[in-house]
Amino acid sequence: MPYYFTKHSDLNEVGAGFVGILDIITGLIVHYSLSFSLSNFSILIFLSFFYLSLGIWSVITNILKGNYYDWRGVVDVINGVSLFSIYSGNVFDLFGLLGIMIIIKGGLSLFLITGRKFKHW
């Protein structure tokens, strides 16, 4: 996983699982932003800053570790920019596709965590 919250691996998996669930929720928000007016919904500004900082952190840590092809941090940055754009009232047709991409990333993150847990049995 690209997220290194602590040095303890179980806490990193809990944090990555939380981010995976948030990815699915925010992916649904981005995807359905074409159908519903979500501008000035105050949680979106918090989520946009969260995902922008998480994505930048992920990209920087992956570059420092020599993992140049990890795409999940870039998706987090795109998610943050999309949520900020929705908050400010600018909704584009591309958000339908971006929302699906974010949902797939969240599902993949959850699948990788649970798949790794079942290997230990």
Image (tube, rainbow, N blue to C red):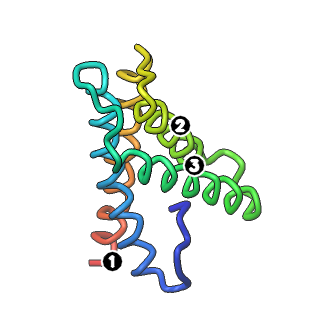
Q: Quadrant of residue 65?
A: bottom right
Q: Residue at x 58, y 56 (%)?
A: 53
Residue 78 is marked as none
Residue that numbered label 2 is attached to: 81
Q: CA distance from mark 3 to mark 2?
A: 13 Å
**What quarter of the picture does the C terminus occupy?**
bottom left
The first of marks 1 and 2 along the sequence is: 2
The amino acid type found where label 3 is placed reads Gly
Q: Residue at x 38, y 45 (%)?
A: 44
Q: How many marks?
A: 3
**x then y, percent, for residue 54:** 55, 57
Residue that numbered label 1 is attached to: 120
The amino acid type found where label 1 is placed reads His
- Mark 3 lies on a secondary structure that is helix
Relative to residue 1, is residue 74 drawn left or right? right
Q: Residue at x 50, y 62 (%)?
A: 1
**x then y, percent, for residue 115:** 32, 62
Residue that numbered label 3 is attached to: 73
- Mark 2 lies on a secondary structure that is helix
Camera-side mark, 3 or 1: 3
Camera-side mark, 1 or 2: 2
Q: Residues within 10 Å of mark 3 (few under 14, many from 20)?
A: many
- Mark 1 lies on a secondary structure that is loop
Height in image: 91 above or below 27? above
Q: Residue at x 44, y 47 (%)?
A: 45
Q: CA distance from mark 1 to mark 2?
A: 37 Å
Residue furthest to the top in view is 93
Height in image: 110 above or below 4? above
Q: Quadrant of residue 114?
A: bottom left
